């Protein structure tokens, strides 16, 4: 399993449209084959900045998602709302403490 972290920054007027769209598609993303976990965070100091954390069984599962019609539709819409170029990291999860 690995974690995909994506940083998204929006124009202020696009925050609500982004959140509304995320609400509509989050279950589809979470239900995509290989996705084990999905969370959305909003920066405390810059309300225009968001982060998604998603856990994937393998890189090939993430790539299948990224090549899917679902992703293409979501990303096609979401990227029109950005104020800055998104950033993404794929990281291996080394430890969890509960």
Image: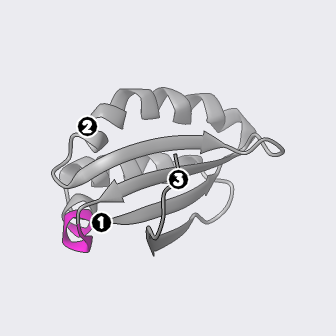
Q: Which residue is mark 1?
A: 1
State the residue in front, 2 or 86: 2
Crowding at mark 1 (Cα within 10 Å: few <14, some 14-19, many 20+): few
Which residue is outermost to the front?
98
Locate residue 26 relative to residue 22 in the image: left or right. left
Q: Main secondary structure of the magenta part?
A: helix
Q: Which residue is mark 2?
A: 28
Q: Which residue is mark 3?
A: 97
- Of the two numbered discs 2 and 3 on the same chain, state the one appearing first in sequence: 2
Looking at the rendered structure, which numbered label has been put on residue 58? none
Residue at x 29% of width, y 54% of height: 72
* C-alpha gap between disc 1 and disc 3: 17 Å
The answer to whether mark 1 and mark 3 are in CB contact below 8 A is: no
Location of residue 56 with respect to 13 vertically, above or below: below
Asked which secondary structure carries label 1, the reply is: loop
Q: Which residues are magenta?
A: 58-63
Location of residue 13 with respect to 45 vertically, above or below: above
Q: Is residue 60 magenta?
A: yes
């Amino acid at each position: 399993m690995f974690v995909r972290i994506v940083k998204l920054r929006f124009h202020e007027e696009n925050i609500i449209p982004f959140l509304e769209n995320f609400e509509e598609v989050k279950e589809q993303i979470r239900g995509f084959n290989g996705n084990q976990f999905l969370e959305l965070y909003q920066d405390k100091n810059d309300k225009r900045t968001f982060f998604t954390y998603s856990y994937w069984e393998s890189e090939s599962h993430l790539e299948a998602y990224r090549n899917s019609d679902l992703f293409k539709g979501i990303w096609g819409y979401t990227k029109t709302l950005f104020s800055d170029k998104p950033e993404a990291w794929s990281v291996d999860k080394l430890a969890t403490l509960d």
